[in-house]
């Protein structure tokens, strides 16, 4: 990451423009911080920030785009964690 000499179309080249998310490095402009005690839900096709203790909607982040089956529209899909084998 960082000041790479190779530029990819539509991707920032400065490390300061990227943030580390559970899905990997993403442009800062496409992320937001979820405060402790809050979580994200999709309700009625919209992405919302919910206060976990009260269930109150704190923010409406907009409509969730419909994905085409087999295609991820933004970023790459996260890998499924493997379960460790249990001892017999």
Image (cartoon, rainbow, N blue to C red):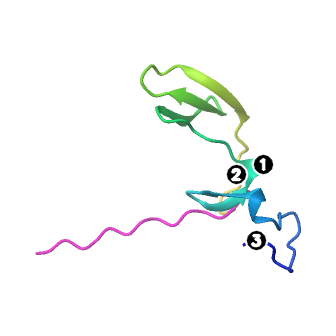
Alpha carbon distance from label 2 to label 1: 21 Å
Determine the image quadrant of residue 65: top right
Measuring 78% from the left and 57% from the top, which residue is drawn there? 17
Q: Which residue is mark 2?
A: 67
Alpha carbon distance from label 2 to label 3: 30 Å
| Left or right placement of residue 69 versus residue 87 in this view | right
Measuring 83% from the left and 63% from the top, which residue is drawn there? 12
Q: In terms of secondary structure, where does tag 1 sit? A: helix
Q: Residue 84 in the image: state x and y as whole percent.
A: 28, 71
Q: Is residue 78 in the magenta section?
A: yes
Q: Is residue 76 visible?
A: yes
Measuring 73% from the left and 35% from the top, which residue is drawn there? 63
Residue range highlighted in magenta: 71-88
Q: Residue 2 in the image: state x and y as whole percent.
A: 76, 71
Q: Which residue is mark 3?
A: 2
Determine the image quadrant of residue 35: top right
- Callout 2: 10 Å neighbours few (<14), some, many (20+)? few
Determine the image quadrant of residue 68: bottom right
Farthest bottom residue? Answer: 5
- Callout 3: 10 Å neighbours few (<14), some, many (20+)? few
Q: Residue 42 in the image: state x and y as whole percent.
A: 59, 35
Alpha carbon distance from label 1 to label 3: 16 Å
């Amino acid at each position: 990451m960082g000041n790479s000499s190779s530029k990819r179309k539509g991707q920032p080249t400065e490390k300061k423009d990227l943030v580390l998310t559970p899905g990997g490095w993403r442009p800062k402009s496409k992320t937001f911080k979820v405060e402790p005690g809050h979580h994200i839900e999709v309700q009625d096709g919209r992405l919302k920030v919910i206060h976990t203790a009260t269930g109150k909607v704190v923010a409406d982040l907009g409509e969730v785009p419909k994905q085409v089956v087999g295609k991820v529209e933004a970023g790459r899909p996260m890998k499924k964690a493997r379960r460790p084998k249990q001892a017999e």
